[in-house]
Amino acid sequence: MGRSAQFILWFNEISIKDVPLVGGKNASLGEMYRLLAKKGVRIPNGFAITAHAYQYLLEQGNLREKIRQALHGLHKSNMGQLAAAGRKVRELILAAEFPDDLRREIAAAYRKLSMGYRSAATDVAVRSSATAEDLPDASFAGQQETYLNVAGEHELLDSCRKCFASLFTNRAISYREDKGFDHFQVSLSIGVQKMVRADLASAGVMFSIDTETGFKNAVFITAIYGLGENIVQGAVNPDEYYVFKPTLGKYRPILSKTVGDKKIKMVYSDESKHPTKNVVVPPEDRERFVLADDEILLLARWAVLIERHYGKPMDMEWAKDGRTGQLFIVQARPETVMSRKPTNIIEAYRLSKKGEIIAAGKSVGSKIGSGKANIIKDAKDIGRFSKGEVLVTDMTDPDWEPIMKIASAIVTNRGGRTCHAAIISRELGIPCVVGTTDGTRKIPHGAPITVSCAQGEDGYVYRGLIPFTVLKTDVKSLRRPKTKIMMNMANPEQAFELSFIPNDGVGLAREEFIINEYIKIHPNALLHYSKIADPALREQIDAITRGYADKVQFFIDKLASGIAMIGAAFWPNPVIVRFSDFKTNEYANLIGGSLYEPKEENPMIGWRGASRYYSPGFQDAFALECRAIKKVREAMGLRNVVVMVPFCRTVDEGKRVLAEMRKNGLVRGKNGLEVYVMCEIPANVVLADEFSGLFDGFSIGSNDLTQLTLGLDRDSAIVSELFDERNDAVRKMVALVIHKAKKNKRKIGICGDAPSTFPEFAEFLVRCGIDSISLSPDAVIKTTIAVHALEQRLHH
């Protein structure tokens, strides 16, 4: 009997070429079981019931003709008619008797699998695998059913019948009609795989590419407690972890970890009718990370192996067995959306004005959409939805797909970035905000709203229709100038997205944004937490540092994570990270800050920058910044991170800061560490030769240099019209420091606003021979074009 006539094929007999026999999911499992298990990737054993078995069942029961009659004259736009036809076909299949020979073979294979796991009737997952599934142009994701914790021959055959019937759910019929597939050309194979006892541990989804931006150097992992179905359905907001692929061999590059709220988990139940049920997760478990760091790194290594094997970005499901503590991969398929996004067209969506935020969650994609809010609680009411409206609901599953494709945007209460709503809206290219928790309550039904995913990781729902612009640039034809064009970066959440803009690295990554947004607490309040007497303040700190017994480690980890996201996004190009440069009034605004900060008449020229780092009131806090940088460079292997000292008034002060850094394990020149200094005080220009002896490079901060050269407070409205970087005195300062840096073979760049704002200032810098210009992201492309044209003119 040829393979194509077999009813059963074991995983070790299947390869990726067998999609026509066993469908995409099973072919992929067989491929991995045969070839990747020996490389250490664990895959539970199992077998496929082939598409031939499905065709044989139809033939023996004379079902083909009956199905054809049931679907005759169907108009898929008629929802009622579609539902009636679908129900009739499913009933025909569910009532069908398995031919004896087919039933015997399935039972024998199941007994053999059970014996292999030392059990009389082992628990299995029964998954449908359509033969046209997971083709890049026909994503049937989640179109067919999965049955978990199936034990016993009778239960197995019952689940197989349900799987076969699921080929004719309303959504599957409508999908095939849409795509022009013949209903009988698509067959169904079934995967029967040993269950991993994730009900006693955890499960999740991972991608070998960032699903939001298409950034290829990161593995994105989501994790929940219990069986993995809840993550795919979006019933739970999961933990999210990012791991950097290029340094994964030698280092531990976990870029970021976010705790999800994981309110429920799916576990086994004792009822044979409903073999699984959802239970509530205790509050203390919700606040913990599902996976340990070693487990995150192991999964990421597997993702890289699987991606390398298939030669394309992959979407995988993993599960952890609570009895053995072992991790397994239970599914893998090609990632079909981001990996096919053209990278040469850069689209930037921007709101034209501010608006009132009525709900917020995680953003999916980076677009903006608007329309009338239509709140629908149940899939049976989807007939009430009209094209161009915004779908607002608790969560979606494949039953919602008919209306998702006509929505201008989607908002859900529940779900993370790998839930059904997120996956489908990514495929459709529409903005989606997931996990708002209360969107259906806060958003008024029928009101016009704007949904924005264009502001980084957080997505916002605004009241009213807010105008927005879309800027498209084809960067393929963009010529690179000799002058390096770098980017100023503050928000780590936007780093992956912005890394697609052609650039030479990051000329200024500011720690202040990370400290303000992610840490929020004054470092001294964490260092001296045990001495804080105010119970309200302690409570505030406890809420933010949830999950951290060691408050100091919280600061180091969060700062390191923010820096690492930027370092990874622009790797291997240099990323220049400036140590914190808050002024005393800004430090006082952090939680607990007023306990540690003096009141100054003029903070702009007071206790800031380098002068803080060696002073007894702050040197322990500066040590935490050093430890965060050390973690990024040495534990994660992101050696492209360069550090920069701001507001360094004297050469002696420069020496003291370098000594402080050395004390904390950051030694200039060791492991290639470069240390730059900001040039923002006239003293830095006048003594540039001496500063060159201490530092590897300079970055001109044109804002402070202008105010200190002209002796004016740029925050004072009375004198602010005199503030102008194009003033002759400022230009002479800039020209002089560029000349001195070149003479001393030191790198020199600029990271102020001037070249972004004034094209003629950028031209002046290029004529002076500056090495690099660092700009706000929206100015990078236009300045790249202008600088390249200028260089061409200068050289002719």
Image: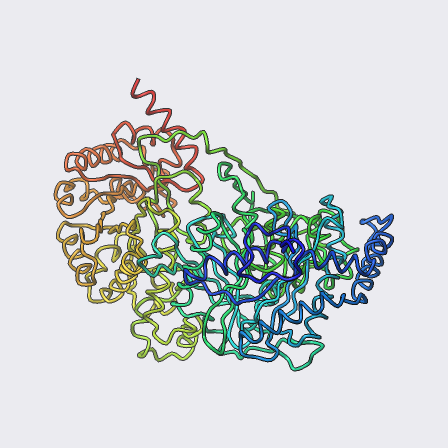
Q: Quadrant of residue 114?
A: bottom right
**Which residue is more in the foreground, 651 or 136?**
136
**Which residue is more in the foreground, 74 or 417?**
74
Q: Is there any visible trace of residue 514 in the rendered image?
A: yes
Residue 385, image x, y percentages: 76, 53
Q: Residue at position x 38%, y 78% from top?
A: 534
Q: Quadrant of residue 547?
A: bottom left
Residue 678 versus residue 536 in the image, above or below: above
Q: Is there any visible trace of residue 445 in the rendered image?
A: no
Q: Residue at position x 60%, y 80% from top?
A: 120
Residue 144, image x, y percentages: 68, 59
Q: Quadrant of residue 157?
A: bottom right
Residue positioned most to the top: 796
Residue 385 versus residue 120 in the image, above or below: above
Residue 43 versus residue 286 in the image, above or below: above
Q: How many marks?
A: 0
Residue 109, image x, y percentages: 62, 69
99 on left or right of 337: right
Residue 180, image x, y percentages: 74, 43
Residue positioned most to the bottom: 270
**Which residue is more in the foreground, 213 or 740?**
213
Q: Quadrant of the N terminus?
A: bottom right
